[in-house]
Amino acid sequence: MSVDETKRLGTRVALWEFGQNDPKRDSGSKLCRLGLASSLRVGRSFNGIVLSSEATTLLSASDAEIVAKHGIAGINCSWNRLEAIPFHNVGKPRNHRKLPFLVAANSVNYGRPYKMNTAEALAASLVIVRADDDAHTLLEPFAYGDEFLRLNAEALDAYAAAANASGVSDAETAFLDAARASKREARSRCSGDTYIHAADLPPDCNSEDDDELDDDETS
């Protein structure tokens, strides 16, 4: 199965696949099957931006030129097995980037901060570098695609508007401060007769991960 040629991406998207997840559930594997992403061998040259949880620099609109020219790549692996990934041998270290605060919408990690799967992480990256049409196309095959963009709309707008990594960091801090204030206000209202569903609130970025949860893939 492949994607309609009228819905092909304008941005090159690639993945290093490490086979740590069930391919039937793995969003990165699905992107490759649909022809929306290509597979890379470890050690193969890649001049584009690489999403890495080990990176120290935030992705920003200042990376848009590199993405437009060379593409963007994800590391398709399990959140629980990051120690097995040779991060030093995937792409150029100077082009490694991490994502700012965002919330997953996939069924495995719904509502959990930073726990996006590969499709979500790549789509968020495309929004940040202002390739929105490609982001929507990338998420179209997934039932949670629209929900991911809805949950993160405010944050993604702020990150995309920032000129560079420092600006994204400032936007992330401002967003988290506002989210914490909103949660405090909501808890105060909940002490009365008002009931607010937890899914309507921004998650706490300091919440502990559930180690028993079978996490999906990361980027």
Image (cartoon, helix red, strand yellow):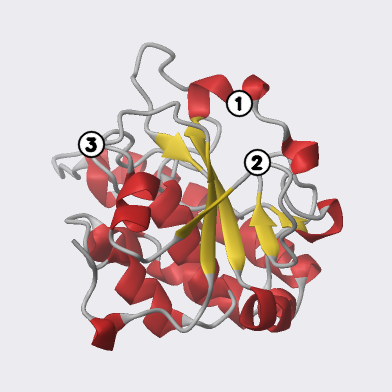
Residue furthest top as drawn: 212
Q: Are marks 2 and 1 in contact (CB under 8 Å)?
A: yes
* Badge 2: residue crowd in 10 Å (few <14, some 14–19, many ≥20): some
Where is the C terminus found, in terms of image quarters?
top right
Label 2 secondary element: loop
* Viewer-nearest of discs 1 and 3: 3
Earlier-in-chain disc, 3 versus 2: 3
Earlier-in-chain disc, 1 versus 3: 3
Which of the labelled discs sits on residue 24, or is there none?
3
Which of the labelled discs sits on residue 82, or is there none?
1
Q: Which residue sits at x=30%, y=35%?
A: 23
Q: Amino acid at mark 3?
A: Lys
Q: Which residue sits at x=37%, y=33%?
A: 216
**175 and 85: which is toward the camera:** 85
Asked whether residue 208 is in view, the answer is: no
* Viewer-nearest of discs 2 and 1: 1
Q: Amino acid at mark 1?
A: Leu
